[in-house]
Image (tube, rainbow, N blue to C red):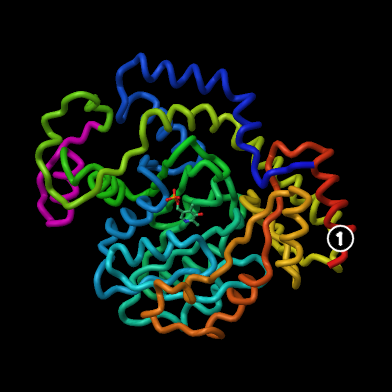
Amino acid sequence: MKIPLLNLKRQYSYLKKDIENVISEILEGGAYINGPQTKKFEKRMEEYLGVKHAIGVGNGTDALVIALETLGIGKGDEVITSPFTFFATAEAISVVGAKPVFVDVKLEDFNIDETKIEKAITSKTKAIIPVHIFGTPANMDKINEIAKKNNLYVIEDACQAIGARYKNKMVGTLSDIACFSFFPTKNLGTYGDGGLITTNNDNFATICRALKAHGSGENGEKAYNFLNNIKEEVKVDNQVDDTVYNPKKYYNYLIGHNSRLDELHAGILNVKLNYLDEWNNKRNEIAKYYDKKLDDKKYKKMKLSKDDFNVYHMYIIQTENRNELSKKLDEAEIGYGVYYPVPLHLQKVYKSLGYKEGDLPNAEYLSKRTLAIPVDPELTEEEKEYIINFLNNLEL
Ligand SMILES: *Cc1c(COP(=O)(O)O)cnc(C)c1O
């Protein structure tokens, strides 16, 4: 039985009508940038997450870069993060000219080990970026406590965890600024690239809004005044229609980016957001079922806190025979993925940071053993049983 890791084509088959409708509505409406779908999506995300500002951007990587820039982080600064994450988390730190400092992860949930953060803090440290990896919330209480004590910012990388709750609070609302991605395979994904920045801080929101659009316009001027301590009132109308011509766009105040959540993607996301909770609940159910049914002697599973709602962006098993298991899964046409084969501190690109094998043993241990199996919310009963039986009957 052929089972992909994630079957987005199957999902599209039942979304098709709504997606086609919203796309033709946008095409016929003529507002292709920052139109009504984008505004509606930002508003809905503010309500869904319970956060003051949700700002659409081009992708999750840009969200991280803009968040760092907004907090004034750059050359000479250090930012603490996890080595067991998608490259973009650290890449964003490097892009702004700062240095990523990696702190090892925990073997139970693969998140940054909060007990090891303080040892990594130096006079140059400006921020901590916890990643809610695979949809599992990081220990935000401890991380925020450490940040407060040491006068550091916290940026959540929530790209894999939309809808996850840390002690009943939505991730992406628990730090200075948070970042989301709508890459197609994320729990909420569009048919292309998209991203979101969230914050409860009005000034950070203004700077983010300025930076995503060439540092221009009213947000640019307001951000400029704030950053330069100029007490001059600038009225910002975020509802202004700049889809065709907005004269304010041609006044620039900061060096920013062109990073927008496109109207077409916002429209697609407005359709898919209706299903997000249902999908996350399904992922959670499938994961609980795997937890119960998969043979503990053959596969080690994640041990996650019962206080949180995990959205299982990935369901990860660990095995000592990953190569062999991969081969068998290939033969059986069961989809899988290896997240992540090389921890970031050992990536070639970061050679100059001076890490060596053995420095972050848990991340290194996991990178040799983890394997993701399908936790697609549309997985049928039959497919689920097939995967479980296949894995439990395998002789490795
Ligand atoms: C996907 C992802 C990103 C980057 O998002 P893009 O939209 O692909 O740029 C950053 N961090 C993590 C943890 C991710 O999973």
Is 178 left or right of 298, judged from the image as shown? Answer: left
Label 1 neighbour load within 10 Å: few <14, some 14-19, many 20+: few
- Pick whichever, 144 or 290, lies toward us: 290
Residue numbers of the magenta segment: 218-237
Residue depicted at 54% across the width and 76% down the height:
104
Q: Is residue 222 magenta?
A: yes
Provide residue 156's location: percent of width, then percent of height.
Answer: 46, 58
Residue 21: x percent and y percent? 49, 17
- Asked which quadrant contains residue 262, the reply is top left
Front residue of 27 and 204: 27
Residue at screen point 26% across, 75% down: 76
In depth, the one of 360 and 167 nearer the eye is 360
Tell me which corner region of the image, top left, top right, bottom left or bottom right, holds residue 280: top right
Q: Residue furthest right?
A: 393
Residue 94 versus residue 161 in the image, above or below: below
Instruction: Name the residue type under label 1.
Output: Leu
Identify the residue at horizontal 51%, vertical 37% (top origin): 48
In the picture of the structure, the residue carrying the numbered disc 1 is 394
- The count of marks equals 1
